[in-house]
Image (tube, rainbow, N blue to C red):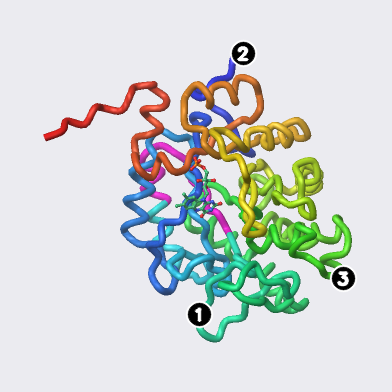
Amino acid sequence: MTVSLQSSSRINKLQLKNRLVLAPMQQHQGTPDGHATDYHIRHYGQRAADVGLVLIESTAVSSEGRLYQDDIGIYSDSHIKPLNQVVKAVHDKDARVFIQLSHGGRKSKLLPGERLLAPSALAFNDEYGLPFEANDEELERIIDAYRKAALRSREAGFDGIELHAAHGYLLHQFLSPISNRRNDAFGGSENRRLQFVLQVAIAVREAVGPDYPVQIRLSATDYNSAGLFPQQVADIFNKLEPLLDAVHVSSGGLTPERPLDVHPGYQIPYAAILKSTTALPVIAVGGIHTKALAERVIAEKLADFIAIGRPMLEDPDFARRLLSKQPLPIQSVT
Ligand SMILES: Cc1cc2nc3c(=O)[nH]c(=O)nc-3n(C[C@H](O)[C@H](O)[C@H](O)COP(=O)(O)O)c2cc1C
């Protein structure tokens, strides 16, 4: 059977109507205490109609883990109701919706009195400043925050969870030898660097049960010879696999260095490496903005789903146009 962008597929037992995914993108429209607003209901509702899956933006599991102070969060029961309205807006358009759970670690923007926590006391840059090395009690508290956030996500009606372990945020900081210089149960070897993410994945899985979709977003490379590289990240995912249902393959963010060559589809080879080592669904992302490229990735089995980011911000109907291959209407110049 030929598989195309329009073919339905599954993540865990959840049926998705096609292979297009709205990539998670922060909207910087949260209230000061992290609540979603009418903006989010409208924004996600407008972009849901033609994708199988909406991934809503990075949503903090604790206030001190917000990536920006205008991010949304799910660290209090009061966050559930407005998020439930976002879920309903997406469901009304016959799409499914996952929440992206995150903690910024050393790349968090704090409120006064909050502590910048990371695996090791190593700064990302001068702007964020020097973090504290999180102690066992703080790590336990963060794992518990993920557990509670997972329960609230399910209560809010989300169809699944994406754990944000990419782009240099807390979970990625634990995985990478550049940011994790601990010499305890959570660092010192590749296996021990995996332990914190493993504990988070176990806590989330125990909270939501076996049938609820839980996937992870990973950076396949740190673009630094001292950091993670794709085959290693594939091995990491293989160890997490029994707890997860899919992987979303991005790259970078651990250090201020950026990839030298960002061409359309530049992360597809990383998705393909993950795809060759797992039977679970793989989501590719990054400059996959034409039907031809997206179809090729699916047909050649380099990935199972295609996430689209920036064009969906500018044009809420981008997915429909991509699927129908209609060119953008020519704007009349008056
Ligand atoms: C405005 C903006 C906000 C973003 N916010 C997030 C986020 O909250 N979580 C995340 O994992 N990636 C985030 N990203 C990265 C996107 O999910 C995506 O990986 C990236 O834009 C590349 O895909 P594209 O070329 O289709 O835009 C963001 C990107 C943009 C442009």
Q: Is residue 208 visible?
A: no
**Magenta includes 97?**
yes
Q: Which residue is mark 3?
A: 184
- In percent of width and height, residue 290 lies at 47, 27
N-terminal label among 2 and 3: 2
For residue 190, say whether it is visible: yes
What is the spatial separation of the Cα atoms under label 2 and label 3, in whole angstroms? 50 Å
Whether 87 is drawn above or below 108: the answer is: above
Q: Nearer the viewer, mark 2 or mark 3?
A: 3
Q: Position of residue 136 (x, y in %)?
A: 77, 76
Q: Residues within 10 Å of mark 2 (few under 14, many from 20)?
A: few
Question: In which quadrant will I find the N terminus?
Answer: top right
Quadrant into which the C terminus falls? top left
Residue type, numbered disc 1: Leu
Q: Residue furthest top?
A: 1
At which x and y percent is residue 246? 66, 41
**Where does the magenta region start and end?**
87-101
Q: Quick check: 16 left or right of 248? A: left
